[in-house]
Amino acid sequence: MKHPFHPQHTLTLLERPLLPDDDGSQKKVPHCGACLGEMKNVFVLHCDQCRPSLYLHLACALREPTVKYDRHDHLLVLYDRTNTKLVDASPCAACNTDCDVSLYRCFGCDYNIHSQCLNLPRTVDFDDHVHPFTLVNSLNEDESGMYHCDICEERREANHGLYVCQECPSFVSHFECVLSPSYTDEKDDEPWMRRKDREYRETEKKAEPFDEKAVPQSTVIFSQLGMEIKKIGETVDELLEETHRKEVTEKLEKIQHSHAQAQVMLRQLGELVD
């Protein structure tokens, strides 16, 4: 199969992959090129044209990069949680700290950014300084090893992200010191999906009695789209437990069919919006 994670080569299904250890004496489990976790599933996807070989969990291969970030050339995919190896190897591109929470990732470039850092402005104005501040992922001003924020005068980490004045390079700030409260206040930091769910529940309480004739076409398509997405999720759950190659292939084809149906519905919704 072709995959947007690895468009240059075709991926093939492989059963129980093992690699020789460094001294060749025993076999070791390879790691997934996307999430960097161990390949513990019975079946994985594999590219034998790459050196070293590329492996992908089936669950990771079914993720599609969808998020465009203006500071990276490729689309990013959301990972809800990370494992220890990914945390150790791949700091956030914005704040330069460990990715131990939700992050967006381009595995081809090993580029990662926290979901919280994705919306940090590249430049920001501060009332008590004449010049704008620019986001950088680290700044070592000297060799003293002691660095401070010029707004709160508290200590800062040299290798962590910060805002710096390009006109006055020695004037630097923590994120939370230069940004408005809307970026840092926990009350305003409600996750987007949780907020949408809450707004939906509040709207549902005020809903008018159901009138089937009054249902717009977009609502019908949304309902059908939800059913297809549910089918994909159920098939993925079955796929991860499957141990026979034939059934794995059939379920992959079923997922691709449901995905194609979902793409058609998304185009229909786009036409309704236009």
Image (spheres, rainbow, N blue to C red):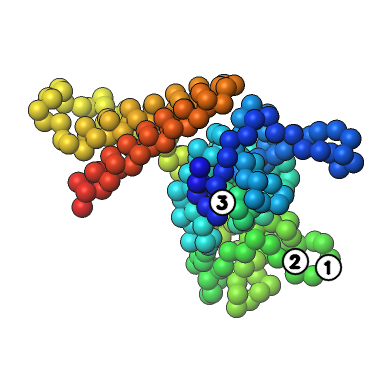
- Label 3 residue SS: loop
Mark 3 and 1 residues: CB-CB less than 8 Å, in contact?
no
* Residue that numbered label 1 is attached to: 143
Q: Is residue 187 visible?
A: no
* Residue that numbered label 2 is attached to: 140
Mark 2 and 1 residues: CB-CB less than 8 Å, in contact?
yes
| Discs 3/1, front | 3
Distance of label 3 from label 1 (alpha carbons): 46 Å
**On the picture, is 107 further left or further right than 98?**
left
Q: Nearer the viewer, residue 108 or 211?
A: 108
Give the amino acid type for the residue marked by disc 1 in the picture: Glu
| Discs 3/2, front | 3
Q: Where does residue 146 sit, x and y in percent of width and height?
A: 80, 61
Question: Up-down: is 251 above or below 124?
Answer: above
- Label 1 residue SS: loop
Q: Is residue 235 visible?
A: yes
Figure quadrant of residue 210: top left
Q: Earlier in the sequence, mark 3 or mark 1?
A: 3
* Residue that numbered label 3 is attached to: 9
The residue shown at (59%, 21%) is 243
**On the picture, is 4 further left or further right than 266?**
right
Please tell me how crowded label 3 is: few (under 14), some (14-19), or many (20+) other residues with Cα within 10 Å: some
Give the amino acid type for the residue marked by disc 3 in the picture: His
Please tell me how crowded label 1 is: few (under 14), some (14-19), or many (20+) other residues with Cα within 10 Å: few
On residue 252, the disc is none
The residue shown at (46%, 39%) is 191
Please tell me how crowded label 2 is: few (under 14), some (14-19), or many (20+) other residues with Cα within 10 Å: few
Question: Up-down: is 22 above or below 167?
Answer: above
Q: Residue furthest bottom?
A: 167
Q: Nearer the viewer, residue 116 or 260?
A: 260
**On the picture, is 133 further left or further right than 258?**
right
